[in-house]
Image (cartoon, rainbow, N blue to C red):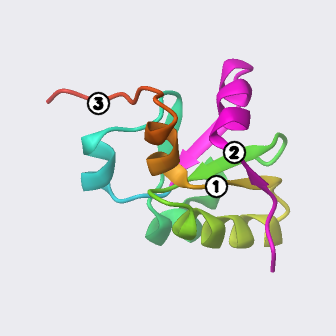
Amino acid sequence: MSVPEVSVDELAGQIANGAAVVDVREQFEWDEGYVGGSRLIPLGEVVDRVSEIPSDTPVYVICRSGVRSAEACEYLRAQGIDAFNVTGGVLAWLASERTIECETR
């Protein structure tokens, strides 16, 4: 199944409008930095936590490079969720010279 994709430029515009963003990387990757406004649901937990993902609005799914997020999008779209893969993932976000957030512990 092919999933619709958006660029990091398109994602930035959607975030500015309050879009739902799900990051499917692992916790250790998230700890290194994440796109502001995103929510962590690691790929291995997506099936069990699908009820936490909005089904009434488009959802933008991101990972490190776009591979895991594409897999998540396939599953989410099969569940009736309007999911979009972020092409290039966090690496593309950083390459576009956008900032990421980090939580301090």
Residue 104 percent across, percent down from the top left: 18, 27
Residue 14 percent across, percent down from the top left: 73, 29
* Amino acid type shown at disc 1: Thr
The quarter of the picture where residue 44 lies is bottom left
Q: Residue 7 shows which numbered tag?
A: 2
Task: Assess disc 2: are there few (<14), some (14-19) or many (≥20) residues with their C-alpha within 10 Å of its C-alpha.
Answer: some
Residue in the foreground of this view, choosing between 84 and 92: 92
* Image mark count: 3
- The residue that mark 1 highlights is 87
* Amino acid type shown at disc 2: Ser
Residue 36 percent across, percent down from the top left: 48, 28
Q: Residue 102 shows which numbered tag?
A: 3
Span highlighted in magenta in the image: 1-23
Left or right of 55 on screen, residue 46: left
First reached walking from the N terminus: tag 2 or tag 3: 2
Residue visible at 46% across and 29% down in the picture: 97
Q: Quadrant of the N terminus?
A: bottom right
Q: Residue 39 shows which numbered tag?
A: none
